[in-house]
Image (cartoon, grey):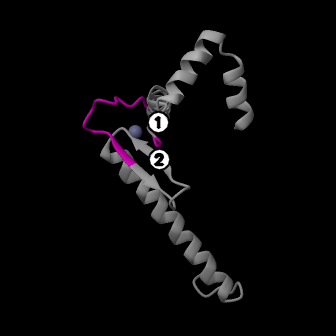
Amino acid sequence: MKLKLHDAIGSLDYTDLVDLHEDLKEGGHSLRSMVEKKIVDKEKEQGKQCCVCNSEIDVHSTNNFTLLLGPEGLRRKACFCAIDCMKYFIDGLEKRKEALKKKAAWQEDGGGMKDA
Ligand SMILES: [Zn+2]
């Protein structure tokens, strides 16, 4: 990460560097808003396709849904084109959890055939 930033700064010409330095001296407001805009762009890019059916998501539609999954710091974003796709995704999560529970119970029984 440090190296990439180093490369980016290295690719700037003298005038850009002086401008950047001026901006940093004044609190780096331009740099901050540039970075923030880039983050928003990247997040939008990630949310362009539905996680379930892969169809293109219209970012202005009110039928879009987004779920944030996972613990703080490791959050993942899942976007859906419609409520049906989100339901399908949640059903899948529940089934997977159920299957893991069954597997754990089966192992606790010593791999017995109790439920078979
Ligand atoms: Zn979909």
- Magenta stretch in the rendered image: 51-66
Q: Nearer the viewer, residue 20 or 68?
A: 20
Tell me the residue at 43%/53% (across/down).
Answer: 68
Look at the magenta stretch and give its main secondary structure: loop
Tell me the residue at 66%/89% (across/down).
Answer: 109
Where residue 10 appears, x then y in whole percent? Answer: 72, 20
Q: Amino acid at mark 1?
A: Glu
**11 with respect to 85 (left or right):** right
> Which numbered circle lies on residue 77?
2
Q: Nearer the viewer, residue 6 or 66?
A: 6
Residue found farthest to the right: 3
Q: Is residue 45 visible?
A: no
Disc 1 under 8 Å from ligand 1? The reply is no
Establish if 97 lies above or below 20: below
Image quarter hosting the N terminus: top right
**116 with respect to 46 (left or right):** right
The total of numbered circles placed on residues is 2
Where residue 12 appears, x then y in whole percent? Answer: 65, 15
Disc 1 target residue: 43
Q: Is residue 92 visible?
A: yes
* Disc with the residue nearer the chain's start (2 vs 1): 1
**Which element carries disc 2, helix, strand or loop?**
strand
Where residue 88 appears, x then y in whole percent? Answer: 41, 52
Q: Are marks 2 and 1 in contact (CB under 8 Å)?
A: yes
